[in-house]
């Protein structure tokens, strides 16, 4: 549904733009709209790339660790998963930002290409937090955490992604819902395909 | 919008009781739809009424309808979660429906708060807190409630078989 309210008329953001990655991750998790409106242009895009890379690195390594603990795979498999995850976050997620950028521009959004990449990457801040916590539980307590923490972290990122896209497309809720569904499905399929290949 | 939200929750309800060895069981599908529909009604009803109660002055100025529309628009945010839950359960064979529902309801709460803030002109902490609080309550309700209800379709099926046997119907 196209919203007639422009970004300039939307309620003002309450968050000060920040270059601090931790502050940016938390803002994207709790108030993505404010992060998009005030913070993305001030935030280095390559740092956001690092955040999504680490997010998927910590997620994928948990998949490897789960299989290593049950003796199904050797330690090298864990390392392969880590490398795959880092690459996935550094290549696939920015690619999503690249693909949604023309759509944002078509909807008269003002985000630059680098900001669109940052939007996609920073949406996975929640995945990074879940990934770090899951990795701690996996290494310290020996739990199987790939689904409970890894996949759940990816799910938690869908909310910020949807709200970010809605903000970037000037309040188009339906487009945000459709794009988030496509992005979410693409990530699930890509993850499954990588598991199959590796 | 309301229909789409109801359908999303009904589908999530079906997935919550899904049996991989008996995927087309009508009792499971029917009960899942019923649970999802009731959950959807309660979720929207409580969120809508709480926002109305907290903003009586605004309700007098603009009426009930815009508030209801804001909550309904936020409810659309469940659709990606319903679709991806279906994909993960039916295609990948994962059992993550509860995670999808809890994250989806949280997204709905945030979205409803955002849509509502457009009516007030600026975000108000009380509205954000009430929609997020409601989302948390409903997430907990699903997480705690589904394990209690998981055997209900089986009981329904058993009861129906018993009644049928009384009447000599196979």
Image (cartoon, coloured by chain):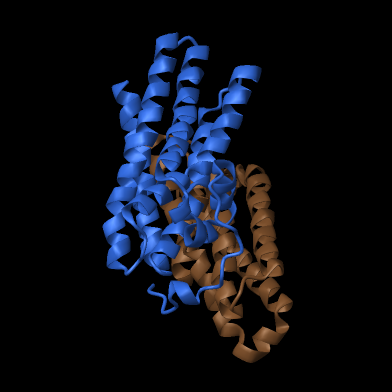
Chain colours: A blue, B brown
Residue A155 picture location, percent across and down: 49, 44
In the shown orientation, is residue A50 left or right of residue A23? Answer: left
Residue B67 picture location, percent across and down: 59, 78
Looking at the rendered image, the quarter that the C terminus of chain A falls into is top left
B61 above or below B126?
below
- Which one is in front, A15 or A71? A15
> Across the whole image, how many numbered discs are drawn on residues?
0
The residue at the point 40 percent across, 40 percent down is A46
The residue at the point 68 percent across, 78 percent down is B52
Looking at the rendered image, the quarter that the N terminus of chain A falls into is bottom left
A98 above or below A12?
above
On the question of residue A132 being in view, the answer is: yes
The residue at the point 52 percent across, 77 percent down is B69
The residue at the point 61 percent across, 64 percent down is A14
In the shown orientation, is residue B129 left or right of residue B22? Answer: right
Residue A148, by quadrant, is top right
B119 above or below A69?
below
Residue A110 picture location, percent across and down: 36, 65
- Which one is in front, B16 or A94? A94
On the question of residue B97 being in view, the answer is: no
B104 above or below B76?
above
Residue A51 picture location, percent across and down: 47, 38
């Amino acid at each position: 549904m196209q919203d007639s309210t422009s970004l300039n008329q939307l309620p003002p953001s309450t968050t000060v733009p920040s270059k601090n990655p931790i502050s940016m991750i938390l803002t994207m998790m709790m108030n993505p709209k404010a992060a998009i409106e005030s913070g993305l242009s001030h935030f280095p895009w390559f740092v956001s790339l690092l955040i999504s890379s680490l997010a998927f690195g910590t997620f994928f390594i948990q998949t490897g660790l789960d299989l290593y603990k049950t003796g199904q795979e050797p330690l090298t498999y864990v390392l392969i998963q880590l490398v795959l995850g880092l690459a996935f976050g550094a290549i696939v997620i920015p690619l999503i930002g690249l693909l949604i950028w023309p759509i944002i521009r078509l909807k008269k959004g003002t985000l630059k290409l680098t900001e669109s990449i940052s939007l996609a990457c920073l949406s996975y801040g929640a995945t990074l937090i879940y990934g770090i916590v899951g990795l701690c539980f996996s290494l310290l307590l020996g739990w199987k955490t790939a689904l409970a923490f890894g996949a759940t972290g990816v799910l938690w990122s869908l909310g910020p992604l949807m709200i970010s896209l809605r903000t970037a497309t000037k309040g188009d809720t339906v487009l945000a819902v459709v794009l988030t569904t496509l992005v979410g499905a693409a990530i699930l399929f890509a993850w499954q395909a990588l598991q199959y290949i590796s | 919008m309301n229909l789409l939200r109801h359908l999303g929750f009904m589908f999530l309800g079906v997935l919550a009781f899904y049996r991989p060895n008996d995927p087309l069981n009508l009792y499971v599908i029917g009960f899942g739809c019923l649970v999802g529909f009731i959950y959807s009604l309660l979720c929207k009803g409580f969120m809508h009424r709480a926002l109305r109660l907290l903003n009586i002055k605004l309700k007098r100025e603009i009426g009930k309808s815009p508030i209801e529309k804001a909550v309904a628009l936020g409810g659309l945010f469940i659709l990606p979660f319903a679709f991806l839950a279906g994909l993960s359960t039916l295609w990948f064979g994962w059992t993550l429906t509860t995670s999808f529902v809890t994250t989806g309801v949280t997204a709905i709460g945030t979205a409803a708060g955002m849509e509502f803030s457009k009516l007030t002109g600026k975000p108000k902490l009380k509205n954000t807190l009430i929609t997020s609080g409601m989302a948390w309550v409903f997430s907990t309700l699903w997480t705690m409630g589904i394990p209690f209800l998981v055997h209900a379709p089986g009981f329904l099926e058993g009861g129906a078989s018993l009644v049928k046997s009384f009447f000599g119907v196979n």
